[in-house]
Each structure stands twice: as C-alpha cells, then as structure tokens.
Amino acid sequence: MTTNHELFARARQLLPGGVNSPVRAFTSVGGEPFFTARADGAYLWDVEGNRYIDYVGSWGPMIAGHNHPAVREAVERAVRDGLSFGTPCAAEVTMAETIVSLVPSVEMVRMVNSGTEATMSAIRLARGATGRSKIVKFEGCYHGHGDSFLVKAGSGALTFGVPTSPGVPKAAADLTLTLPYNDIDAARALFAEHGDDIAALIIEPVAGNMNCIPPKDGYLQALRELCTKHGALLIFDEVMTGFRVALGGAQAHYGITPDLTCFGKIIGGGMPVGAYGGRRDLMAQVAPAGPIYQAGTLSGNPVAMAAGLAMLELIQAPGFHDDLAARTVRLTDGILGAAREAGIPFSVNRVGAMFGLFFTSETVESYAQATAADVARFNRFFHGMLERGVYLAPSAFEAGFLSSAHGDAEIDATVTAARAVFATL
Ligand code: PLP
C-alpha cells in the first residue's frame, strides 16, 4: 500500500512544497497532509484507508456532500457527448439563466475557470468602465492570486505571513489600497482622500479567508453608499459565500445590491469554474459585446456546466439553506459548549453553512482580533481532531463549511471528538 508519507515525499520532489495549492501542504498547522483516495457524502478516505468527516468540502464547492449522485450522473451524461467543444453550447445558456434568476443583481454573466479569473476580470472591467485605476480591498480578504490582490491578502498568504508576494510589481501593488475590515470610519477617510481615483471596492461580504468574520450590522450598506457617492463600483467577491450563506448569496442574506459579483466553487459543482456578472450596462462592455477584453479556451466547458447546473438544482430544494444553517448552529454550539466545559477561551462565528472557530474569549469582528487568537492552540486542536477522524481546514485562518450530507451522526461525532481534544489542550 502507498502511504501518505511516501506520496508526500514523491510529491515534494516534483511539485513546489509537494502540492498544487499552498495551504494543502499543512505548513501552517505542521505535519504532513494526507492524500485523498476517494470522497463520498460527508467523508474523505485517504490512501491508507483512514476515514475523515470533512469540514473543508474541497474548500467550499461540495455543499451537497462529496460525489453526490445527481452531480456525478450529470457529468457522466455530459462526458458521453464530448469533453470540450470550443463553440457555444446550450448548457452555458442554461447556466447564465440560472445564475441571473438566483441572483437579481446579476443581469449578465461571463463564465470563467476559477475564482481568481473571476476577480481579475471583474477588476479589469471596473477599471475599463470607470476609467480609474485604483482598487480598494480589505486586509485579510483573499480574492485569488492576481497581482492586484496579493496585497495584505488572507488565506495562504496570511498563513505564511507573506502578505505581498515577491513577483508582484510595486507598480501594481501601488494601485491597491487596503482597509481594515468592519471599520467604516477608515473606509470613509480613504474615500474622502482617494474617492475620485477608485475604480472599485472589492470585498468578501462575509470574510472567509481570515477564518470566518461576518460584516457588522449596516457595514455593507455603508460601503454601498460610499461607492455610489464616489462613483466607484462595489464588487462582491461571492466565490465562497455565493449559493452558500443563502441561495442568493451574501447579497440576498444582507439585502445589498453590488454592481458586480464574482462566483466560483459551488457553481462548478466540484469542477473548475468561476463567473463574474452584474449590471447589464457594465457587462455589455466585455468583449466581444464591448472593448474590455477577456477570454478562455475552456470557459463554459460543457462538463463543468453540467456539474454546476446539477449542483445549483440540488441547492434550490425548499429549505436547503435553512436546514444547513440549523446544522451549522448545532455543530458550532456543540463545539463551543465542549470548549466551555473544558474552560478553554473559545468563540465561534457563523453565517449560514459557513463557520469559524477561534481560540479567544472575544467575539471576533476584525482581522486584528483573528490574528490575535491562539494559533498554536488551534494547531494542536486541528491535529487532535484529525487523529480522531475529523478534518478541519489546515489553518487557523480558513472558514469551515458544512454540507447537506453532514447529518446528526457526523455532527455529534465531531462534538464528541472536540470534547476529547479540548481535554488534552
Ligand atoms: N475569492 C475568494 C473569496 C476565495 O475564497 C477564493 C479561493 O478560495 C478565490 C477568490 C479564488 O478562487 P480560486 O481558488 O478558484 O482561484
């Protein structure tokens, strides 16, 4: 039998850090990653046959659980007709109609292949449409690995303490202004100084790359007003929150209308897919309807569209999101209760089926608070849970995700494991 360790040793010879995406390498939590052989429902199995209850869900897409038969069968059907055509196909039209019907602020949409492509393209559109060059992002928010965003980014970049990557030209970074999340006074001050130069403000409406931090009451609305006042576009990066925190995403949950929205993860059903869309007058400026160029050999791929459409069908079942939110409450209340029993300073955040666990007694509302929580203790907790068959995201700065395949049995087993691990911390 191949072991996880042997595979990682081979991987490290040929893949930078042994992985194709940094946070998978366990650098933040220490130790070595496991290699997944298969996934089903709420579970992953590694190559050694160990089973884990999975709260990562492929970093968000698997909201209906792994290997859902409806998604798998849709892919199998699509594959029979060919893998890629390079011409328009009907599934792209159905996908656009589905997104537009579920997210009212999106009047037109362009499919791409990842969340990174979606955010990069949205920023180009914002700059092209406004004729301005500066963008505003938030410290600890992650929008993929485009040059403009690797400035005080979250996720892997936060984890590794390299907020600005070498290779990002200073000239590009200079055009990105950063703000503290959840601080409206700071945003007002920045716009007062730079408002005329700002093409767009991009935000994760629920921050999910510095652990999970919801917006304060009224915060997103205040940002909406600020953008409108200064002629800047408001871009919601809903790559993580889209179709997860509510059917219509965070914008439906909080009742805010952004100008542009970026999607990824769930709309691909586990295949590499992203999308950006929004106001018709803006999207009509994208090539070939307009002059702002953006393209993709595999964009709108028929197999990926089939997976995404099947997933979007599943999540439209009545009560799907309410049920997931209730399960998330059961899970996080259970873990919080176990921490309290053990006398460990702990707090949780949650929005819909997205949650954050923090080793601090404070309610976490800011990047500064998230980074001040006890990361070393989280890392011990992570490994204790893994040993007991529960896979949490391998970093203190990632949100957790539930799926509809996480039933009471999995949730209760997770809380039991947490109780045992807290006793060792
Ligand atoms: N935006 C957000 C909010 C994300 O969480 C991510 C990835 O985790 C991205 C963008 C980038 O998406 P991708 O990894 O598909 O390029």
Image (cartoon, rainbow, N blue to C red):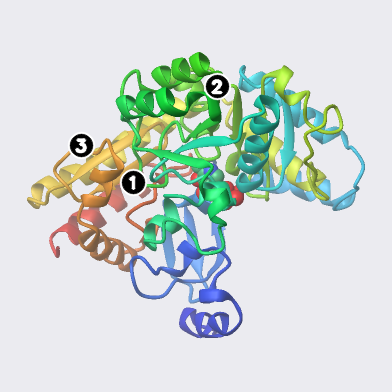
Where does the image place residue 97, in percent across and percent down from the top left? Answer: 75, 23
Query: Which quarter of the rendering shows the C terminus?
Result: bottom left
Q: Earlier in the sequence, mark 2 or mark 3?
A: 2
Q: Residue at x 14, y 65 (%)?
A: 424
* Residue 184: quarter of image: top left
Label 3 packing within 10 angstroms: few (<14), some (14-19), many (20+): some
Residue placed under numbered mark 2 in the picture: 258
Which amino acid lies under the numbered mark 3 shown in the image of this protein? Thr
* Up-down relation of residue 280 to residue 200 (above or below): above
* Image side of residue 92 versus residue 101, left or right: right
Would residue 416 be visible to someone looking at this image? yes
Residue 199 coordinates in the image, percent (x, y): 58, 29
Q: Disc 2 to disc 3, how far (Cα)?
A: 27 Å
Q: Which mark is residue 363?
A: 3
- Quadrant of the rendered image containing residue 402: top left
Q: Nearer the viewer, residue 364 or 330?
A: 364
Q: Give the x, y percent position of residue 214.
A: 35, 32
Q: Secondary structure at mark 1?
A: helix
Residue 411: image tag: 1
Tell me if label 1 and label 3 are in contact, CB under 8 Å.
no
At 77% across and 34% down in the image, what residue appears? 292
Judge depth for marks 2 and 1 and give the one in front. 2
Q: Position of residue 139 (x, y in %)?
A: 39, 43
Label 2: which secondary element: loop
Ligand 1 within 8 Å, label 2 CB: no
Relative to 275, is 398 above or below? below
Q: Residue, x 24% and y 65% (percent of image)?
A: 380
Cα separation between marks 1 and 3: 23 Å
Q: Could you tell me which secondary element the residue under label 3 belongs to?
A: loop
